[in-house]
Image: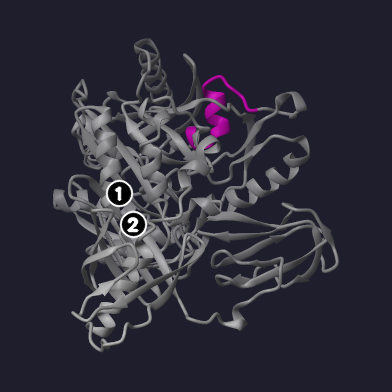
Amino acid sequence: MITSVLVANRGEIACRIFRTCHELGIRTVAVHSDPDANALHTRVADTAVRLPGAAPADTYLRADLIVKAALASGADAVHPGYGFLSENADFARAVLDAGLVWIGPPPSAIEAMASKTRAKELMGLAPLGDVTPADLPVLVKAAAGGGGRGMRVVRRMEDLTAALESARAEAAGAFGDGEVFVEPYIEDGRHVEVQILADTHGTVWALGTRDCSLQRRHQKVIEEAPAPGLPDDLRAELHELAVRAARAVDYVGAGTVEFLVSGTRAHFLEMNTRLQVEHPVTEAVFGIDLVAEQIRVAEGTPLPDEPPRAGGHAVEARLYAEDPARDWTPQTGTLHHFSVPPSVRLDTGYANGDDIGVHYDPMLAKVVAYAPTRAEAVRKLAGALEKATIHGPTTNRDLLVNSLRHKEFTTARMDTGFYDRHLTELVGGSGEPYAPLAAALADAVGRSRFGGWRNLHSAPQTKRYAMAGEEHEVRYRHTRDGGLEADGVRVLHANAGGVVLEVNGVQRKFEVARYGDWVYVGRTSLRALPRFPDPAAQHAPGSLLAPMPGTVVRVADGLTEGTAVEAGQPLLWLEAMKMEHRITAPHTGTLSELNAVVGQQVTVASLLAVVRPT
């Protein structure tokens, strides 16, 4: 009987597993890097053990340190979570060799399936060898790990070498394994997967299908169960292939078999020998706790011959601290306030006041809605996200809401190219038009308490805000009765926390919160601007500023001051939040200044280079 579990992971992953452990009466142990010393998963665990350092390679990827932490803390079992070392056979062996219970599949099964190249061979498939122009487009893919890291789409032969190098570097940094392979890239496919659960007595469950087609950078954004619109014979084929894959490697525990579905054909992608981020949608439709089942299987408890019956529909959205309108750039800073309506499930690794740093994945939370039908579940999730309070760095919340309400998604006609086709329209918009006025009125109430009016008609007060990349100036006046007025808008109520306006006879209510220069009006974020711009903040035309804190990991070969560059040409690469980000030339010209060097740590808005336009 397991009494204490160490989770070899962090953030939302660890918090989710701890929740089930606490419900089962199992003591919990967290491990943490130095940046995570006060992270939520560290705070909610019964015991926490430090892994000195910040980089994953020095902390969460150190199997030896994690095994020592488990022994030192008195844990009798290790759960690998669903990232970092979760698909590392050597780690599983080290846990077992230390006399601990491994809550996962046998090392032999991990070894057989953890490498996508070996998994394809096991299923009678093989990656591409020598790529020719006739093979394009192709996908360069990391052999280990997942989450979209180490993946590059190549459409031109001249881009293949750079894509291979970049994918190898990213895969090595994220998984400790730089092996990559190449396979055909299917443009219009749906990403469909089957959840499996197997015990040590020979029983294997196929727990339905999930659709994970909405992806950015090959990382899933919105998932649902069951996958909509699949013919019965195709669904049965997917279940059969998934069970066959599990039995082929004597699988034990929870795992996922992934496919790309094109028309009525299923193409095997890989088998993930771990729990997936999107497992809550399967839990919702089957009414089970997959983590609890993993623990029971690890204890030797047999599964019933048949899984429970599925019912209803569930949809999950991954909320990221990122800006989809700026090439999905990760965002950092303080998460001042974060809450969602109680009608949905929230799995998160953050609480109010926590800092979102640069070292790890930018996912804030998973938000999951369940309902009797797909349409109801989609509507519930979109409404909950719209009403969520998120005061902090920019997120993909609006993208998620707009995606869930897009006709292509509501009619279940989406595929993996959804964001390639629709990103511009989904992130478009300049924010709530009355947000700057509401922010100014709330600020005026907080500062003046409506005193100091004159018999003479006073001049209007002005305030400036930055919203959605544009500057807005608003004007308002104090009235003799202690109120406020603005041209064309009737102010019904105003205090520091909220404003009610009447616009064309319709009441508009706005909740307002302020943290320093940042103001949040409903779903819209604004930055209060000084009355006069700071001349020192100006940069020369063509200046390339760091979009986030990070590390310079590459500079283009032969790039020196005086080099001629073309618009869009990659100049250097930053690594932040476990992803590589290209910094490209804003226009054709000459590199007149280069401040970045490999290994350099940079902060937001650091001047990296200057390209003088031709």
The image quadrant that residue 132 belongs to is: top right
Q: Earlier in the sequence, mark 2 or mark 1?
A: 1
Q: What label sits on residue 365 in the rendered view?
A: none
> Which residue is disc 1 drawn over?
386
| Amino acid type at mark 1 | Glu
State which region is magenta: 113-127
Q: Tally the numbered discs.
A: 2
Front-most of 523 and 175? 523
How far separated are the C-alphas under marks 2 and 1?
7 Å
- Residue at image position (37%, 56%) is 432
Residue 517 part of the magenta-drawn span: no
- Residue at image position (32%, 40%) is 316
Residue 120 part of the magenta-drawn span: yes
> Which residue is disc 2 drawn over?
523
Q: From the image, which quarter does the C terminus lie in?
A: bottom right
Determine whether label 2 and label 1 are within 8 Å by CB.
yes
Location of residue 7 with respect to 130 vertically, above or below: below
Q: Is residue 269 left or right of residue 608?
A: left
Where does the image place residue 348, in percent across and percent down from the top left?
Answer: 30, 54
SS class of the residue under badge 1? helix
Name the main secondary structure of what is drawn in magenta.
helix
Front-most of 484 and 131? 484
Where does the image place residue 180, in percent across and percent down from the top left?
Answer: 63, 40
Where does the image place residue 489, in percent across and percent down from the top left?
Answer: 30, 62
The image quadrant that residue 44 belongs to is: bottom left
Residue 105 in sight: no
Q: Is residue 301 left or right of residue 270?
A: left
Residue 438 in sight: yes
